[in-house]
């Protein structure tokens, strides 16, 4: 009889759940005997970020139709078990509402109402996505094939090592001292707490010295929002997705209400409860992330992707003698698509924006974009646009993410008025959907992210390009545009500003502790007004996803044992290499080319094994999810329902490759 394989999966959130699902599905097909130990202090399925006891005010930033942990039929070599087949979040949602599916735990009245009110295009509360994840886990657990057993350990994994002379190669230690043997270990750790930056440590020290309150980066559901004082000035740093969560808890969460504006159907009016703090927010951009457009699907149906395609990148690979560069090879193609989609929609919806006939302009633009003249196309497009498009209607990509860069304001009120006007225009564009040129340019970049994830995972770019061009330049730019909240959130931000509950510091603010006055002080160099003083400062951001800053006893001990290490990347100037944010891994592909010249994009996913001391690849320790940020990009984005394995379902395909490698021995 074939011996039983023992697998420890560390992390019970979506990535760990995918590992369990893939191991189960493949074991059901092969009849391999497998025992799975699932380790996480948080409930299995939902894990930490998606746990079901959090406020319903915390929303996802993808619509119901998007996320899944179950691949669609045919996307992977082995389909899921029959009991969960094709069960994306949206299909589960419809099944629960129709009475065909019973949630693992009874929904309360608020949850039932929220689920019933959702459509495929609405943005669900994170707690409801957690309900879906817990149902998937429980359903898998109830229908395990007879050759698979599963044990759940509600504890933290604190150490792992190689057992030199034992039946099972590895041992994983849990908090409390229990040791679990394993033939393979899957690290699906998800979001981890992280050490603070030096400037944040100074704020911690200053707060302790002057009895101030400083909240470091955290998962919003972990924060104690009820402790924030009413009617007191509170500084908030960061205006991304966590910022929207903070606003929701400090306004709606305290009894305030949003109502439709009778004079403007695109606006909301906020009715304060009187228990709100006075919120003053700042970020490098100076504005919140842009709202997502209202679309029938996740991608715009009328979008035309002509230049940044897998086929185009494949052509580059076929003739390239060196690794790709993001700035030289990939970004120009993405920019071409953004230009084309912007001006094509502008010509359709606003022909008066053109000095010459719109059709003539599009033909000339098309000829320039198709002409293979290297970098000169950008200058030629700029020249064409400057003489053919009315000023103010021209696409300025740099302004999309930083609308107030290099603009001075005389007061906070003047800046608030400018921000509200900007937010109202952003809302208007989102409500126009595919009829808005700016939103379609951004939609083009959003669609490009899916292709980019495949290219980076399978072909990669040079180290210096990854560090300097992709992570430092492009990532912050595109996140503020394509990773934004639903339009409802921006309508709420504008309403809170008009109600006087919310104000903004301005771009590039600086946060310090005034040790003479004993308070936090924040100011922007672009707003000529008195600095804002407060006794509270909240970091509206999650802990950094960086294996060298993460507070994880498991990773720390594995690093000390030489089992894992962070990946070093060469810099552009050839100086000392820099450490990436992810683990060093060996991408052993079961279905992919390895040499650059023979690489075929879209041929499969990878089983990533950790690389440790002396370049040693550990054969049975695999990585999924956030700690792969040294070799994959967009690692926090959920799997996309009904998507091919090499594109939106790559996270599921990676889990599938890990399961295949483990069961192959």
Image: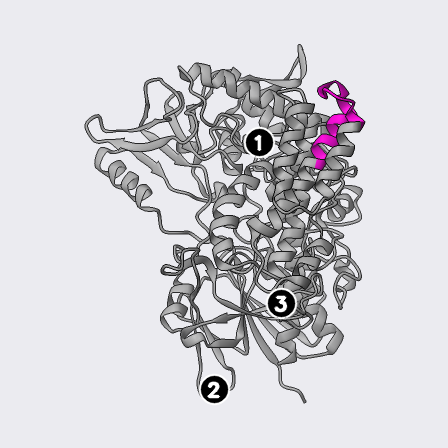
Query: Residue at the spot x=53%, y=48% of the render?
Result: 49
Q: Earlier in the sequence, mark 3 or mark 1?
A: 1
Front: mark 1 or 2: 1
In this view, the residue in front, 79 or 646, is 646
Query: Residue at the spot x=23%, y=29% of the render?
Result: 518
User: Which labelled disc corresponds to residue 400?
Assistant: 1
Q: CA distance from mark 3 to mark 2?
A: 40 Å
Q: CA distance from mark 3 to mark 1?
A: 35 Å
Query: Residue at the spot x=61%, y=40% of the render?
Result: 61
Q: Which residue is mark 3?
A: 596
- Tell me if 300 is positioned left or right of 234 in this view: right
Q: Which residue is mark 2?
A: 166
User: Which labelled disc corresponds to residue 108?
Assistant: none
Q: Earlier in the sequence, mark 1 or mark 2?
A: 2
Magenta part of the chain: 340-359
Where is residue 559 drawn, in percent x and y? 39, 68
- Give the overall secondary structure of the magenta segment: helix
Q: Name the secondary structure under disc 1.
A: helix
């Amino acid at each position: 009889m074939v011996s039983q394989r023992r697998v420890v999966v560390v992390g019970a959130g979506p990535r760990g759940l995918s590992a369990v699902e893939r191991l189960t599905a493949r074991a059901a097909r092969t009849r391999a005997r497998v025992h799975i130990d699932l380790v996480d202090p948080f409930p299995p399925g939902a894990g930490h970020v998606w746990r079901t006891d959090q406020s319903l005010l915390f929303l996802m930033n993808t619509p119901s139709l998007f996320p899944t942990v179950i691949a669609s039929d045919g996307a992977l070599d082995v389909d899921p078990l029959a009991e969960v087949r094709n069960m994306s979040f949206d299909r589960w949602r419809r099944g629960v509402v129709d009475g065909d599916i019973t949630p693992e735990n009874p929904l309360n009245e608020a949850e039932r109402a929220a689920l019933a009110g959702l459509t495929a295009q609405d943005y669900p509360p994170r707690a409801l996505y957690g309900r879906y994840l817990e149902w998937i886990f429980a359903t898998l657990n109830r229908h395990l094939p007879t050759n698979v057993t599963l044990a759940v350990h509600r504890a933290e994994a604190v150490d792992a090592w190689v057992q030199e002379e034992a039946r099972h190669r590895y041992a994983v230690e849990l908090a409390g001292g229990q040791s679990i043997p394993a033939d393979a270990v899957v690290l699906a750790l998800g979001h981890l707490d992280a050490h603070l930056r030096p400037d944040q440590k100074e704020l911690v020290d200053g707060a302790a010295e002057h009895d101030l309150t400083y909240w470091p980066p955290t998962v919003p559901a972990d924060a104690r929002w009820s402790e924030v004082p009413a009617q007191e000035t509170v500084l908030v740093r960061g205006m991304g997705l966590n910022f929207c969560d903070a606003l929701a808890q400090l306004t709606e969460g305290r009894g305030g209400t949003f109502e439709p504006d009778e004079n403007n159907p695109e606006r909301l009016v906020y009715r304060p409860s009187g228990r709100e703090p006075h919120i003053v927010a700042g970020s490098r951009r100076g504005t919140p992330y842009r709202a997502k457009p209202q679309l029938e699907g996740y991608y715009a149906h009328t979008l035309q992707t002509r230049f940044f395609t897998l086929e185009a990148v494949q052509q580059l690979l076929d003739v390239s003698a060196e690794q790709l560069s993001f700035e030289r090879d990939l970004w120009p193609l993405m920019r071409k698509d953004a230009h084309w989609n912007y001006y094509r929609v502008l010509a359709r919806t606003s022909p008066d924006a053109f000095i010459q006939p719109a059709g003539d302009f599009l033909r000339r633009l098309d000829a320039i974009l198709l002409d293979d003249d290297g970098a000169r196309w950008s200058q030629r497009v700029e020249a064409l646009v400057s003489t053919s498009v009315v000023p103010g209607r021209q696409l300025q990509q740099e302004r999309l993410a930083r609308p107030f860069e290099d603009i001075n304001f005389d007061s906070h009120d003047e800046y608030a008025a400018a921000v509200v006007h900007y937010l109202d225009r952003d809302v208007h564009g989102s409500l126009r959907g595919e009829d808005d040129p700016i939103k379609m340019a951004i939609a083009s970049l959003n669609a490009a992210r899916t292709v980019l994830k495949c290219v980076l995972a399978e072909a990669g770019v040079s180290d210096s390009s990854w560090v300097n061009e992709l992570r430092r330049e492009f990532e912050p730019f595109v996140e503020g545009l394509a990773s934004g909240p639903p339009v409802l959130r921006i309508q709420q931000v504008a309403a809170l500003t008009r109600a006087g509950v919310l104000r903004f510091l301005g771009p590039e603010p600086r946060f310090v502790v005034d040790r003479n006055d004993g308070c936090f002080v924040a100011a922007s160099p672009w707003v000529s007004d008195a600095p804002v003083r407060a006794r509270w400062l909240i970091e509206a951001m999650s802990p950094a996803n960086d294996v060298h800053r993460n507070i994880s006893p498991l990773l720390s001990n594995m690093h000390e044992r030489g089992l894992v290490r962070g990946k070093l990347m060469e810099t552009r100037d050839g100086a000392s290499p820099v450490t990436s944010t992810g683990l060093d891994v060996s991408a052993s592909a079961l279905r992919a080319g390895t040499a650059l010249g023979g690489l075929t994009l879209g041929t499969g996913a990878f089983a990533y094994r950790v690389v440790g001391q002396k370049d040693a690849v550990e054969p049975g320790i695999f990585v999924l999810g956030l700690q792969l940020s040294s070799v994959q990009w967009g690692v926090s984005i959920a799997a996309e329902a009904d998507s091919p394995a090499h594109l939106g379902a790559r996270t599921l395909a990676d889990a599938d490759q890990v399961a295949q490698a483990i069961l192959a021995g």
